[in-house]
Image (cartoon, rainbow, N blue to C red):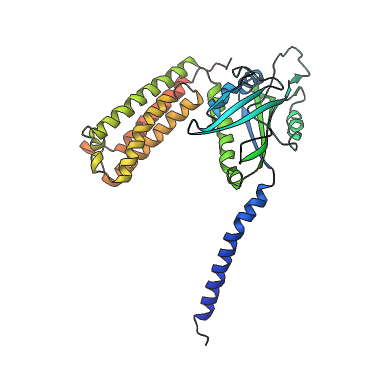
Amino acid sequence: MMTKQTPKLIASVMAMQSCTLSLLLLPAIISSLSLQPISLRTTVLLKDQSPSTIQKFLASPGNWPKIVTTSVGVQSDQADVDQPLSVGETVDEIFGLPPILPLAVRWTCKKSVLPSNKNNNNDGKKRFGFWGTTSASTPSSSSSSSSSSSSSVAGRLEFLSEEGLENFAQNCQMIFDVQQQQTETNNNKQQDTKVILNMSYEPKSPLAVLAIPILTIDNAIALKFLLPAALRSEPNLDKFRQLMGNLYGVAGLAHLADCLVGNSQLLTMAGSPSYYELPVVGQLLALVWCAVGPLSFALKDGKGYADMGLIVYGLVEVLGAGLITLNYGNGVDGMNAFVNAVLVQGVVAGAWFYSANKKEEFE
């Protein structure tokens, strides 16, 4: 006997069957996608940077961990990792959490095309690429980039890893095109450099497909943020990075001691209960706050990594202060922990920009 609820019941059953079928087919869909090569492209224009400066930095594997957040280190039995690789030389790039979870990709330099300058044969500038390889479909990027400047031809460096990462991906390729760009501002010529990274690989696991957003973000961070930061070698900025790393390292250990064996004085001044009176989530956040200090200290000599350490510390401190203010109100004498944290980090950011005011190119 049909009732008013029968159509709704039938619709609910059909919806459940549809969801169940979709979940059953999802692995097959991902597996079919895994058979298709994946290509990623990232472009950046570096202002007032010469191709020779960039090529020397990017072609030297020892610099890769400074700008690639997923790269832990590099090693080679046949090449000096602090010098640009030559064709045929190999280098192992280490990922993961060695020695607990060591992951490695062996890259072989397959092509090194030096740039040429049609109008100036005495340029003497060589351009290589960054840790990168590319698929066979990407060579058009060279012609497109070179067409943007009639007086120069882009340099190119290609890497190949046929084995790739075990059980994850194979035939990993990367290519870097480094193209000089001439711009004029107020009748003054400025030398900029356009860097194009094309990366491709063949997935062997659905995880390699799901990793596309992570790899895209990682490449963007490497080129658009960490590379410009690492190319800065100003003594003043390096000293500031080391100073703040040291201060944050000491502060983190002091905060940890105050939380675990002290009276949680800094927390209570900000308006928070003492460490042991906080809920479990609050205690975990307090420990993270303490841990980012030593993290900043560990990264203080990494140029681009050093800046990431300072940023992470600042974000954690502002977030923690905001949560304290939101949940417990103001602290001693009406102190607003969130406002104070923002002001302090604003001073740190201002000091960073001040220290970076005089720029010297990477040599």
Residue 178 on image: x %, y %: 68, 26
Left or right of 349 on screen, residue 88: right
144 vs 87, nearest the viewer: 87
Vertical comparison of 196 with 38: above or below: above
- Single out the residue that lies furthest toward the top: 122
Residue 258 on image: x %, y %: 25, 31
Can residue 291 be seen in this snapshot?
Answer: yes
Left or right of 244 on screen, residue 303: right
Vertical comparison of 288 with 237: above or below: below
184 vs 126, nearest the viewer: 126
User: How many numbered marks does the figure carry?
Assistant: 0
Residue at left 41%, top 27%? 296
Residue 162 on image: x %, y %: 69, 34
Residue at left 34%, top 40%? 285
Q: Quadrant of the C terminus?
A: top right
Can residue 48 be seen in this snapshot?
Answer: no
Vertical comparison of 342 with 183: above or below: below
Residue at left 26%, top 45%? 328
Residue 241 on image: x %, y %: 43, 22
Q: Residue 350 occupies which quadrant of the picture?
A: top left
Left or right of 92 on screen, residue 241: left
Q: Residue 59 occupies which quadrant of the picture?
A: top right
Residue at left 76%, top 15%? 120
